[in-house]
Amino acid sequence: MKHDLEQLKVELKYEKTNSCVQCGYCLPVCPTYVTMGKETHSPRGRINLVKMVGEGRITDLSVLEEPMDLCLGCRACETACPTGVEYGALLEAARAAITRRKKLSVPVRTLRNTLFKKVIPSRKAMKFIGNSMWLYEKSGIQKLARKSGLMKKLPAHLGEFEAITPSAASPWERSSLLHITPAIGDKKFTVAFFAGCVMDAMFRKINQLSVKLLSEAGCDVILIENQTCCGALHAHSGEIEESKRLAKSNIAAFEKEEIDFIVNNAGGCGAMMAEYDHLLADEPLWVERAKRFSENTKDISQILVLCGGIIAKDCPPQRITYQRSCHMTNVLKVTKEPLQLIQSIPNVEVIEMNDANMCCGSAGIYNIVNYDASMEILDQKMENVKDTEATTIITTNPGCLIQMKLGIERENLNGRMRAVHLVEYLAEAAGIM
Amino acid sequence: MKAITSAHVKEIISIVKTGRVLTNESDRYSYSFDGSFGTYLPDVVIQTKSVEELATLVKLANREKIPVYPRGQATSLSGGPLPVKGGMVFDLSVMDDLLEIHEEDLVAVVSPGVLTSNIHHAAERKGLMYPPDPSSSHVSTIGGNLAENSGGPRGLKYGVTKDYVIGLEIITPQGEIIRTGGRTVKNVTGYDLTKLIVGSEGTLGIITKAVLRLIPKPPASETVMAIFNSLVDAGRAISKILSSGILPSKMELMDQASIVAVENYQPSGLPKDAEAMILIELDGHPSAVIDEAEQVSKVCKEVGARKVSIPKTKAETEEVWKARKLVSPAIVRIKPTKISEDATVPRSKIPEMCRRLQEIKKKYNVHLVVFGHAGDGNLHPNIIADKSDKEEMRRVELAVTEIFEAAVQLGGTLSGEHGIGTMKAPFMEMELGAVGLDMMKKIKQAWDPNNIMNPGKIFPEPGQKLVLSE
């Protein structure tokens, strides 16, 4: 028993809980504490639960499950924390420890069949679910989804998701993107573009625009063949081993090319890749390679600013609000560049919403597996969005983009307000189609 | 004191019609701590906005002798909300609906769950100010501030929470709802129960509403930064400024250990070889504060400051105060456990207290850092340790005990603003004397004969000692 507890302490990274002084500074910035209204769903509360398990006061690990499941992983608490608690690492460790101790799931097929049988015969919806399923299979999130009653919930809300699903190419129809897109004009950098799985599956167009923007800004853009998912969804749902495997294959794939930067357009992926060195810290053969990969990983906004911004055409006056990607703010700490680019466009008026740094509730697939909790967070976000009277919401991550589109739908603001990715907005301003 | 039975829980659930009753393990453990030390598991956690429901619950608690623990957002550094004897925790942070600013009466009317910083913002929007400003005001509830009589940097000029409370609504330990004071600054009708309740740490009743006094917001402020080669000189400068006819709004001290910690954490060119740095803020009429800043600079130089500067721009001013803000995060990088004390001495004894603290630091070989609201004698000696090192923690216990002794010997007090709670209870008699403490106990017994309101706080149990090495 004692041995088990020692083992659990290591798995939970118990010693990291000691840097939490329980001051509570994380409470007001935590979306789940604010909407759910109890400490059990606050960062401080979750850390304390891990501590209690590590100290053997709580012996039933399942006590951790719901609080950890309901965490968005936005990591706003890390930004607010005065003592530098590594909450993200603790969250992932707890989820992994829970996952390891649970019985493995029924075959993926069962879930798939159920879903596809229940899904209304709508092609658009099918495509959305199909794309999501692809993710599910890869990630092992189905366990989480099943447990949270996804199968019961999803059909009921399908209409909402359907309405906002972009007409995207499916992930199986691989690329119309060139292997190398040369820089236009003077070449400044050689960059490898990280396509990402959700971006590639659902927002292929945005990826294409990203490559064009980079090339116009002066980058040779390489699309590396063997790249794969960044592993964020896996890591966030306790599948640490799988996320390590993906990280290694990405590192190996990108090492092959002579490049200055690895550029992505999804805050969630960027944050994951920027932490590959943490993920692989225990693997001496990989840690240095991971470190190089992480250091080279940049958000597209950083590279565009580095290249001197974009050249905008004459634009009509627009009122903009910027919904930050949590992982860009709290993990990558990229906060200035997107705003700098937006503000460089003529006639644009940027109105900051209240609680601008608060998560929108998308959080990977949180909005699907924890639908009700997510919608409550979204509704609060939309109140702040509406107060700005903006006509365009700009995001920098696919999950946030879907969620904002859903928010517009829920508030019946279609036609009066739109949600776009920063890349789409910049491309539009630069006249790139 | 009785344990809660399932019949009690049933009755509680039947009373709480508009809120939530939390009984599962993960929820109860999530209300078992605060910002201080120890884990104490409550039997039930109740969240309701209804004062009537809370009053009915208190009646039940009084009848059945079940402990009741009012709690805000548990930022307490003294153990105020810890449910040390189990029972019911009332999570009053949910009572956050009422925040009215009445400009004509110069008062704010608030419910206990409102965040203190929200009161600051609401008042400022009307050109007014609610002066008490604990560092945690963006997290702490006003209810917690009232119960603990919180202070803050501005305490130097403006006083603490109790100086701004003129009326309360409370639930008595018998479950009755009463009102004390009112909306007038002048009010001498009977005993001043308002002042008795404020700072009573939840041992006499549950605050469900408060009327707070507001003042006009000063239009301008100036900052002065002074660096000293000797900590005792810095202490002398503080005393001298305060006797020169100027009352700054803030006066914050950083000793060498905190300067070094901040500079190692986020280098910004602070002098690591200096023994102390003081930051002074003056507020008031624009031309007055400029003049006062000059005078303060002069005094610092006379006492032997090595460098004195007045930041010119807003950005420079923010940079100066940032160093002070970084002390807390910087020092916990050294070791994870922070024991934050708030022993306070009369202003004239600041240099002597600084000297004593240095002695204690050497004697017990502890990592002691001094920073805080020096101007009002509320030095914050913080000890940085590692609670998994039992031997070190025992040395810390001895050092803390001696800090308390030093403060009391110099005519000061155990606690300037954090409260007694569990941690300082063993030292109460040292400051108050046996009879003094007994008079306080008599008040408690008269109000709460069944001892259901926040039992285990303020008054020491027989033989209770300070224990940090669990």
Image (spheres, coloured by chain):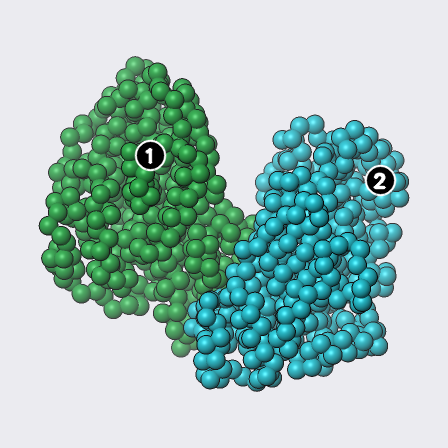
What color was chain B assigned in the picture? Answer: cyan
**Relative to the observer, which residue lies in front, B112 or B286?**
B112
Chain bearing tag 2 is: B
Viewport quadrant of the N terminus of chain A: bottom left
Depicted A122 relative to depicted A420: above or below: below
Q: To which residue does mark 2 refer?
A: B246
Chain bearing tag 1 is: A
Chain letter, colour green: A
Of tags 1 and 2, the one toward the viewer is: 1
Q: Dot 2, crowdedness within 10 Å: few (<14), some or many (≥20)? A: some
Residue B345 drawn at (x, y percent): 82, 57
Viewport quadrant of the C terminus of chain A: top left
Residue A337 drawn at (x, y percent): 43, 30
Q: Residue at left 35%, top 60%?
A: A69
**Relative to the observer, which residue lies in front, A41 or B69?**
B69
Q: Residue at left 21%, top 60%?
A: A151
- Which of the labelled discs sits on residue B314, or is there none? none
Asked if marks 1 and 2 touch (Cβ < 8 Å), the reply is no
Three-letter code, disc 1? Met
Q: Dot 1, crowdedness within 10 Å: few (<14), some or many (≥20)? A: some
Q: Residue at left 45%, top 83%?
A: B6
- Which of the labelled discs sits on residue A417, or is there none? 1
